[in-house]
């Protein structure tokens, strides 16, 4: 198998990630924050250490500003539902995932409005267009860092600066960049940053986090046991306990810590360099295959590790099935849970076929994938 679906979830995981999960399940046990025995205390330490390594990765000054979630979708929902009130206005982009678009659409019924700033045919969004959408009641700007459809990097540094100048909150969806592109929440001037643990952070599924800016307190998505202030029937005020009701996915977080430690040891800049090489190799190879149409920015330095294309007039889902069944290429086809992004680049409703190399993708695998695409194109021509 040649795995080119890292934008959906990374594979393979580093051996130390697998070992960390197994070790937690086999050797430690204990419920973090609940039990004072050795296993419970070890689990509590592990959770704090995981906050610390994520804080180091994204240059967060305080590990307690990291709230753990099941995935980026929950993190985005926590920020969106936690901040907005009736009468508020939000600005977002046409390149967003449904994890942003659906909560905003749902909140329309509560009197919360939003403006979608459309990108150009490459998926790029202009910061000035964001600025022009600001209203007196605008409360928040939400933007993805890297499009999961085109790999285009949005100008989030400019957006963060603009948000601060206009006293707006800024939420960054770093689902496709955290772990593969260097990030600093301070440099981005982000109030919130959401990311999954199972993509470029190399952790297990069922993990994610939301960075919450200093002195910001938002509404919770759920209430319940936190292991703290158990005598109080109201949800604790202190973060991150306030946002983490219920038993944590401790074995998942053990794997996440191992994944982030692997990234920190390797260096995110090195990972970015490697993935950029594979993306460039993919783009160059696909561009010379007759009938292939590439999408996204032609400037390779402005892309994340996502390459979308269409095989002429052929059905993308059938093409993807053939790549998988006959050539062992694991990729993704369709709308990628981002329908407006496909409307932006002109591929709605069929979508595209997406290759997303990862840290473990080799040059030989890219060449094999290109050969397979060429062969399938000839097969159906």
Image: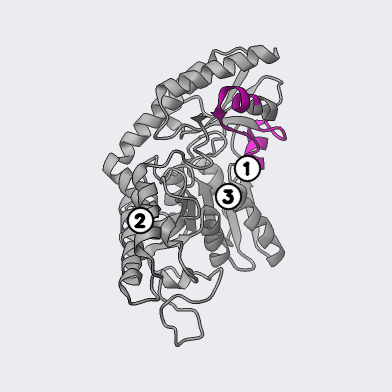
Quarter holding residue 290? top right
In x, y percent, where is residue 37? 32, 75
In the rendered view, would you say 127 is above or below 370? below
Residue 137 percent location from the top left of the image: 59, 62
Marked residue nearer the N-terminal end (3 or 1): 3
Question: Tag on residue 338?
Answer: 1
Q: Which residue is mark 3?
A: 92
Image coords of residue 107 (percent x, y): 66, 62
Is 332 magenta? The answer is: yes
- Foreground of the two, 307 or 112: 307
Task: Assign a secondary structure to mark 2.
Answer: helix
Q: In the figure, is residue 379 to the left or right of 230?
A: right
Q: Does the magenta-highlighted stretch encompass residue 344?
A: yes
CA gap, disc 3 to disc 1? 13 Å
Residue matched to label 2? 23
Spatial CA distance of label 2 from label 1 is 37 Å
């Amino acid at each position: 198998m040649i795995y080119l679906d890292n934008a959906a979830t990374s594979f393979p995981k580093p051996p130390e990630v697998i070992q960390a999960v197994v070790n937690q399940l086999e050797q430690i046990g204990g419920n973090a924050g609940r039990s004072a025995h050795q296993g419970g205390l070890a689990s509590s330490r592990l959770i704090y250490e995981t906050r610390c390594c994520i804080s180091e990765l994204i240059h967060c000054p305080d590990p307690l500003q990291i709230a753990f979630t099941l995935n980026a979708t929950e993190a985005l929902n926590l920020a969106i539902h936690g901040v907005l009130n009736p009468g508020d206005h939000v600005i977002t982009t046409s390149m967003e995932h449904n994890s942003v678009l659906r909560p905003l659409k749902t909140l329309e019924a509560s009197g919360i409005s939003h403006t979608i700033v459309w990108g150009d045919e490459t998926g790029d969004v202009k910061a000035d267009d964001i600025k022009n959408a600001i209203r007196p009641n605008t409360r928040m700007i939400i933007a993805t860092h890297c499009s999961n459809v085109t790999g285009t990097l949005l100008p989030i540094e400019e957006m963060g600066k603009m948000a601060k100048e206009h006293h707006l909150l800024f939420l960054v969806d770093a689902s496709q960049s955290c772990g593969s592109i260097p990030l600093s929440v301070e440099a981005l001037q982000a109030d919130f940053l959401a990311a999954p643990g199972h993509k470029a952070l190399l952790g297990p599924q069922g993990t994610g986090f939301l960075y919450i800016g200093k002195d910001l307190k938002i509404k919770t998505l759920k209430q319940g046991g936190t292991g703290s202030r158990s005598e109080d029937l109201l949800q604790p005020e202190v973060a991150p306990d306030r946002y983490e009701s219920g038993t944590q996915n401790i074995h998942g977080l053990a794997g996440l810590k191992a994944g982030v430690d692997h990234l920190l040891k390797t260096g995110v800049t090195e990972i970015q360099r490697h993935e950029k090489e594979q993306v460039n190799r993919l783009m160059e190879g696909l561009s010379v295959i007759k009938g292939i149409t590439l999408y996204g920015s032609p400037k390779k330095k402005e892309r994340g590790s996502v390459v979308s294309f269409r095989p002429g007039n052929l059905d993308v889902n059938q093409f993807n099935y053939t790549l998988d069944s006959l050539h062992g290429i694991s990729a993704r086809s369709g709308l990628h849970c981002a329908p407006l992004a496909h409307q932006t680049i002109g591929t709605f409703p069929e979508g595209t076929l997406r290759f997303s190399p990862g840290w473990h993708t080799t040059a030989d695998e890219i060449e094999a994938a290109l050969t397979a695409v060429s062969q399938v194109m000839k097969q159906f021509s």
